[in-house]
Image (cartoon, helix red, strand yellow):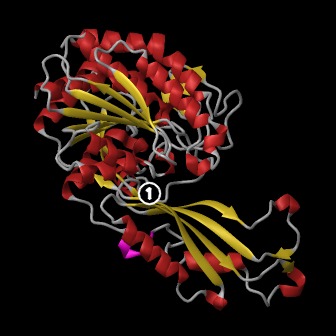
Amino acid sequence: MDAAALADRVHGAWDADVLPSLEAYIAIPALSPAFDADWRTTGHLATATEHIRAWCAARSIRGLTVTVHELDGRTPVIICDVPPFGGAPDDDTVLLYGHLDKQPPMEGWIDGLGPWTPVRRGPRLYGRGGADDGYSAYAALTAIEGVQRAGGAHARCVVLIEASEESGSPDLPDYIERFVATGVLPDPSLVVCLDSGAGSYDRLWLTTSLRGLVGLTITVEVLADGVHSGSAGGVVPSSFRILRTLLDRIEDAATGRVLLPELHAEVPDDRVAEIEVSAPQMGEEAGGVFPWVEGVRPQAGDDPVALLRARTWEPSIAYVGMDGMPATAIAGNVLRPRTTLGLAVRLPPTVDAEVAAAALERVLTADPPFGARVTVARHGIGHGWNAAPFEPWLQAAAEEASQSEFGRSWATLGEGGSIPFMAMLGQRFPAAQFAVTGALGPENGAHGPNEFLHVPCATSVSVCIGHLLDAHARR
């Protein structure tokens, strides 16, 4: 394969074809079903699906077919199917994965930016969903197209773009079983996932682990209705204070350390070694790049190794939402009847999420103070994932790709986020190699305000995927 021709083709496609289409996609408020219960009526997911489908179908790729699959009651899935090329064997398959559904808009976008307003500022394309994960279909198709134009080879490629990932991929298992049963998706020997992150924008990064996730809501009730705080204060216990007491059972309030042993795991030796190599390369960014308020410091300290370990192999609890409290501007002197809190609990990659969820439920509901009514509801569970060792051909291909496109060696990194699809695929296809990568680098703003796609990095990742496809076909 002509590496220069591959790069020229992919870069040219991104400049001429990808960016205009990606900007139009950003303008579509295609919220994931968890954030838009009426998604069928609003139609935004359908609009985004058709937008991506039409762009994919117009690509100049030999043998390409593009179809939209819709199971009853499920969000749609796009399948792009490309037969083997360049002498690759007929009995091998590569699965390339991404998603098109989006997180909610969030508040806090800086002046001139907004979730549904695509804006280019230097290398950054701002707007919700561009980086997480709208660019994935464009990256996969331009990589395949580039390989064909550069005289390369690739096995059969199946590009799967789903529309429920930000809700925990609840619709995907049924599709995978259907696709496997009907031959749409034979067992792949390589899985390429484009929904992950990068430690920096100057090299190819492959993800080696992902944390799991347990989403819970806990509700504490003490009254049927709110009452005058002067009349009830000192007699009726505060639902908020009881909730605070319950949280002390699962987390050390002073340090943030999670207290339940079921939520911890020993870090494997190979991951310890990886952290010790990657963290110094990342330096201060090992703990992530965040918009800190002046004077605030990380709870894990300032050692890069400790920081990287904390956000990839340690459990953590985020308190993501609260019900039952009015805004302070309209709050009366009322002792409220109930408080509800939303928790997002991140788990080490090898912890069983069901076991962790059961432990949280048991500890939070046992013997509640003052006999308060405490209920815990699950609203999403995702298992973590730990990659199998890379085979020699994949290691060599990643090095060649990164050197050719970025001018420096590739690197590996565990990610603190979750991709439910990966744990499911790891169990479904245990013999496959996994190349999990992406353009979600420092300061990218995914899930929060000011999300952006680093366009040069995303383009170069697309080129690197082309290298991996060619190396896989020739291994």
- In screen coordinates, is 152 left or right of 22? left
In this rendering, the answer to whether 233 lies above or below 7 is below
- Residue 410: quarter of image: top left
In this rendering, the answer to whether 305 lies above or below 52 is below
Residue at position x 21%, y 33% in the image: 93
- Where is mark 1, residue-wise? 301
Image mark count: 1
- Image coordinates for residue 124, horizontal then vertical, percent: 53, 25
- Residue 322: quarter of image: bottom right
- Image coordinates for residue 300, horizontal then vertical, percent: 44, 59
Task: Read off the magenta span.
Answer: 258-263
Residue at position x 38%, y 53% in the image: 303
- In screen coordinates, is 53 left or right of 223? left
**Which of the pair 380/401 is nearer the observer?**
380
Badge 1: few (under 14), some or many (20 or more) residues near its Cα, within 10 Å? few
Give the amino acid at mark 1. Answer: Gly
Location of the C terminus (image quadrant): top left
In this rendering, the answer to whether 10 lies above or below 275 is above
- Residue 266: quarter of image: bottom left
Residue 100 in view here = yes
Residue at position x 39%, y 25% in the image: 66
Residue 414 in view here = no
- Image coordinates for residue 304, horizontal then vertical, percent: 37, 49
Location of the N terminus (image quadrant): top left
Residue at position x 58%, y 53% in the image: 296
- In screen coordinates, is 427 left or right of 119? left
Residue 404 is one of the magenta-drawn residues: no
